[in-house]
Image (cartoon, rainbow, N blue to C red):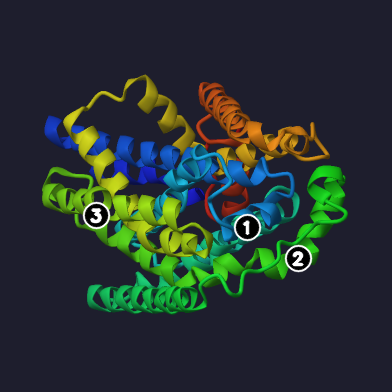
Amino acid sequence: MTDSIADSRSDIAARHRKPDESVASKSAVRTRLVALDVLRGIAILGTLGTNVWILTNAEGLVGYLDELRGSATGRLWAEPILQQLAQGKFLGLLTIMFGIGLAIQQGSAVRGGRRWPGSYPWRAGLLFLDGVLNFVFVAEFDVLMGYAMTGLVVAYILATSARAQRRWLMIAAGFHIAMLTLIGTAIALAGQQNSTTPRTLDPNPYAGGSFWDLALFRLRDAGTFRFEPIFVFPMSIALFLAGAQLFRAGVFGPEGARIRQRLMILGFAIAAPIDLAVGVLGGGDLVLLTRYGTAPFVAFGILALVAEFYLRRPRVGFVGGRLTEVGRTALSCYILQNLVASVLCYGWGFGLAARVSPAARVPFTIGVYLLVALIIVTAAHLWLRRFERGPVEWLWNLSYRTLAREPRTNTAA
């Protein structure tokens, strides 16, 4: 999603670009490139599958959280199922892919004889700035700020020994699991006795406010809206490190067959059924246990499945091609999809979310998702027919190379 995503194709290709390169080696490199881009595209469109329910709620994120805390009963059965299918899985996948991007950058730096993390703090700082702007002006559920802080920490961890990295992974994962266990215990003991009263927005900046009103609302409630990145910080560190280790272990290559098999069993045969059952039937605050507990394991299964698929099927195909284009412009598409959906749903745009009846919420949300997905897929395709990088990626890359005083690549739009 950052310059690490934009540079990964050239970094991997450069690593294997040798005069005597065999056909099999070329195929393996190409498969790895395709799988990485496709996974990023899946992660971007998948996060939209979660965020679209926030955007189509008449009270935005506040209303969405109130619905999650309530019971699933009373809602159309399709709504909790559709929400649970996307809940946390693609956020986890995006986080894992970011860790893979860091491993790629580190490998490129080492091969080029450069210090690591070197100028990476500039990258993290720019990503944090992107996140601040995205949070204030586009989406209060922004993930970029959290990724910037996590990436900065993990970049230094990756400079340590393999043993130390495994230790940090276990510490971060253990701390996260301990927090989830405490939360789960508290939920079980509290039962329904301490059900919170839903917050009513009056006035409602999502439905009746201007673009600036909504920006000011995000700033006033920044403490509430920014709680998730703080809460998931240990989980994010663990997923970053796990992604980096899986990449180095060859999860995208023929040598990673056993790793992929285990990840698919863990993700689809074990975690996915538990995640769906608890998320749909449990309802309420149990979504915390699925979003941050079982969903990341499903994400590992998705990663392994896509890697296996493109090892067995070298041709990208039409769908793979479109996902690849979204993956190559991931940062631009992430911002664009939330912006387009905001125009459709919020009061400063067409204001459709407040006009839709509860009975029409599910088909309306599905329609918004399909329309926004079509727009960003088409935009990525048309843009990459002429330019190498997405527009935000190009500006990001230009800013980074200026600040870090690195040579500029010929990728300007």
Nearer-N-terminus badge (3/2): 2
Residue receiving disc 1:
65
Q: Position of residue 79 (x, y in %)?
A: 53, 41
Location of residue 345 by image quarter: top right
Q: Nearer the viewer, residue 370 or 332?
A: 370
Residue receiving disc 2:
221
Is the C terminus in the top left, top right, bottom left or bottom right quadrant? top right
Say what secondary structure mark 1 lies in.
Answer: helix
Nearer-N-terminus badge (3/1): 1
Left-right relation of 255 to 366: left
In this rendering, the label closer to the viewer, 3 or 2: 3
Q: Amino acid at mark 1?
A: Leu
Does residue 206 lie above or below 35 as drawn?
below
Q: Position of residue 245 (x, y in %)?
A: 27, 61
Q: CA distance from mark 3 to mark 1?
A: 27 Å
| Badge 1 density bin: few <14, some 14–19, many ≥20, Cα 10 Å | some
Residue receiving disc 3:
270
Q: Amino acid at mark 2?
A: Asp
